[in-house]
Image (spheres, rainbow, N blue to C red):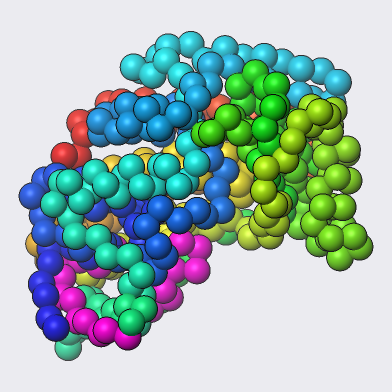
């Protein structure tokens, strides 16, 4: 079967579903495909920063997130060894609280809004290859569903929002234009009955941890350390043993006393940060497909929402193939990189865990400054659609 679209988005998580939503709201014919199931969970840091919360509010989705039982976060507590610094989340830029929805909630809300806007979203659908014309321009893709059905889809633009190991990025040979060397590894799970005062971040030389209140009265708790150390601990005694040791070293263990873990633990191995070239003839990248940094920044979801807005604006300024579209996509990456490169450099240093408490305070202040720049940019531009 053959179908033609203005844009096809590969990946229906935060970045991909958001691009599909914005393009569909502007009247484009949009197909979004994902090999996973609707509403399935995925590895995530959960926490939204102010710019991400602002995006959901501007798109009219924040009320649905709140109605799903996502608790408001109005304080952030930084634990530097034995020293605790509490920061209130004061109303600013139209945002009076932060939120950390489970991905089973957030992804579904954005997908539902995209479908309501007219996008076609197909889950359980894997991309088997890209289509090209005689000049090498990407013109669509081929898909296969779980029951073996094969389709060919044509489009003016194919957008890869398919994660760190992006098939689209690999197929077009998207080069890495900036990269890091450091990476953390994390073990996380969910606890009930945890007494937390908003987001709580813990720092000890060589170790980190965090507590993030989320849906269903649960708190996501993670512990982190350099990837090599985490791997040694897991090999020595398993994931549970590694979590306990890292929780003790990271300073979060006392917080867990008396609370009950709900479900198992997940072990997320590290990957150094990178920026890929994110545009070309007939293709673009967004989200982790184009830009990844260590999860210790807790900024990945906010990045995805921001870059979805930037990419959608670029596409809508030149929706058809040609030089104007290439210029618009290059402009999208230029703005993304201006915001991402400083954050990538700071996060690289934090991910090393090779700092003392005085240095990590300075690094986090610098990271907060880059987030302010991001918030000012997002607040200064009209919503894409």
Percent coordinates x, y for residue 258 in the rendering: 81, 28
Q: Going 36% across and 70% down the picture, which residue do you hit? A: 124
Q: Quadrant of residue 202?
A: top right
| Residue 281 shown left or right of residue 48 in the figure | left
Whether residue 262 is in magenta: the answer is no
Count of picture labels: 0
Whether residue 163 is in magenta: the answer is yes
| Residue 380 shown left or right of residue 168 in the figure | left
Q: Residue 166 versus residue 99: which sits nearer the camera?
A: 99
Q: Quadrant of residue 54?
A: top left
| Residue 35 shown left or right of residue 247 in the figure | left
Q: Going 50% across and 69% down the picture, which residue do you hit? A: 165
Q: Is residue 346 above or below residue 281?
A: above
Percent coordinates x, y for residue 6 in the rendering: 12, 63
Q: Is residue 15 in view?
A: yes
Percent coordinates x, y for residue 313 in the rendering: 21, 45
Quadrant of the image containing the C terminus = top left
Percent coordinates x, y for residue 234 in the rendering: 83, 60
Q: Residue 132 versus residue 116: which sits nearer the camera?
A: 116
Part of the protein shown in magenta: 148-172
Q: Extreme right residue here?
A: 236
Q: Quadrant of residue 130?
A: bottom left
């Amino acid at each position: 079967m053959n179908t033609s679209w203005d844009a096809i988005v590969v990946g229906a998580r935060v970045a991909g579903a958001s691009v599909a939503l914005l393009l569909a709201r502007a009247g484009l014919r949009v197909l979004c495909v994902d090999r996973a199931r609707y509403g399935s969970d995925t590895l995530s840091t959960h926490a939204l920063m102010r710019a991400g919360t602002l995006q959901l509010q501007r798109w009219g989705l924040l009320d649905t997130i709140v109605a799903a039982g996502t608790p408001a976060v109005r304080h952030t507590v930084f634990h530097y060894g034995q020293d605790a610094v509490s920061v209130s989340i004061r109303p600013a830029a139209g945002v009076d609280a932060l939120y950390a929805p489970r991905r089973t909630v957030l992804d579904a809300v954005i997908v539902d809004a995209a479908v309501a806007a007219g996008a076609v979203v197909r889950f359980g659908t894997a991309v088997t290859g890209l289509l090209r014309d005689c000049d090498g321009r990407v013109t669509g893709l081929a898909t296969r569903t779980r029951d073996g059905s094969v389709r060919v889809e044509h489009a003016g633009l194919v957008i890869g929002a398919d994660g760190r190991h992006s098939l689209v990025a690999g197929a077009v040979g998207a080069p890495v234009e900036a990269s890091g060397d450091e990476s953390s590894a994390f073990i996380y799970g969910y606890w009930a009955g945890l007494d937390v005062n908003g987001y709580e971040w813990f720092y000890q030389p060589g170790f980190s941890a965090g507590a993030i209140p989320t849906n269903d009265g649960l708190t996501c708790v993670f512990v982190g350390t350099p990837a090599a150390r985490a791997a040694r601990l897991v090999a020595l005694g398993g994931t549970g043993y590694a979590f306990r040791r890292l929780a003790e070293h990271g300073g979060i263990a006392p917080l867990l006393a008396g609370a009950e873990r709900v479900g198992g633990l997940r072990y997320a191995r590290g990957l150094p940060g990178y920026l890929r070239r994110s545009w070309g003839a007939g293709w673009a990248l967004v989200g982790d497909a184009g830009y990844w940094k260590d999860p210790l920044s807790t900024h990945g979801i906010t990045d995805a929402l921001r870059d979805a807005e930037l990419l959608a604006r670029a596409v809508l300024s030149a929706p058809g193939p040609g030089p104007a579209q290439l210029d618009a996509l290059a402009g999208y990456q230029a703005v993304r990189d201006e915001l991402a490169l400083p954050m990538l450099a700071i996060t690289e240093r934090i991910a090393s865990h090779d700092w003392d408490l005085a240095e990590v305070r300075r690094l986090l202040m610098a990271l907060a400054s880059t987030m302010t720049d991001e918030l000012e940019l997002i607040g200064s531009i009209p919503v894409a659609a």
